[in-house]
Amino acid sequence: MADMPKILDAQVTDADLYQAFHLMKKKDFVSALATLNKGIKKEAVQADPVLQGLFLSALGVLYKLQHDFKTAYKFYQQAEKLMPDEGSLKIITSLLLIEEFAQYDTALKKLDKVMLSDGGDPAMVHHVRAARGMALYLMGKKAEARALLDEQLADDFAKLRSGANLDF
């Protein structure tokens, strides 16, 4: 771990988690998997559901990068069970349902839950509207999809704190 990435979040200080993402960035998926499995075993002993969820979500990222979308979805769902109030996981799984599995109705229901819990967060609203628009468009509901796009553009993204909120 000599080439360890810097810890970016004071609340998430697990070195294995950061190392796994560093390895994924380098496309060293075998080492990333071993690092994540090590972290999951460690967190099972410490019984921290948030860190367990973060490790499971990271496994979702790992498998998504390898185009194994079914396995990625499985790990994201496990993470969602440990962190049920984390809207970003619902958005990620909704996007997989839309883009990879054509399960638009299920995705829309998940996105509705995000709006109920995180509807005050402009970044989350932006992502939900974009995902909803994609699902509606693919369902053939082009007028509804267009209305969502128009809503997105109407405020010129003024409510977003920064461009960084567009990419999570």
Image: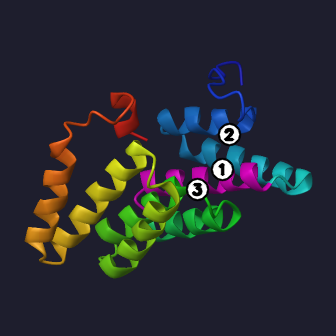
- Measuring 58% from the left and 68% from the top, which residue is drawn there? 77
Specify the color scheme. Answer: rainbow
The residue range painted magenta reads: 49-68
Q: Is residue 158 left or right of residue 118?
A: left
Q: Amino acid at mark 2?
A: Leu
Q: Is residue 78 left or right of residue 38?
A: left
Q: Amino acid at mark 3?
A: Glu
Q: Of marks 1 and 3, which one's residue comes earlier in the chain?
A: 1
Based on the picture, tell me whether residue 53 belongs to the magenta stretch.
Answer: yes
- Residue that lies at the very extreme toward the left in this rendered image: 143
Q: Is residue 38 left or right of residue 164?
A: right
What quarter of the picture does the C terminus occupy?
Answer: top left
Q: Which residue is mark 3?
A: 86
Q: Nearer the viewer, residue 39 or 34?
A: 39
* Callout 1: SS: helix
Q: Nearer the viewer, residue 3 or 145?
A: 145
Based on the picture, tell me whether residue 23 belongs to the magenta stretch.
Answer: no
Q: Which residue is mark 1?
A: 54
Q: Of marks 2 and 3, which one's residue comes earlier in the chain?
A: 2
- Measuring 36% from the left and 62% from the top, which residue is drawn there? 95
Q: CA distance from mark 1 to mark 3?
A: 11 Å
Residue 155 on image: x %, y %: 21, 40
Question: Which quarter of the picture shows residue 19?
Answer: top right
Q: Which residue is mark 2?
A: 17
Q: Nearer the viewer, residue 37 or 122?
A: 122
* Callout 2: SS: helix
* Callout 3: SS: loop
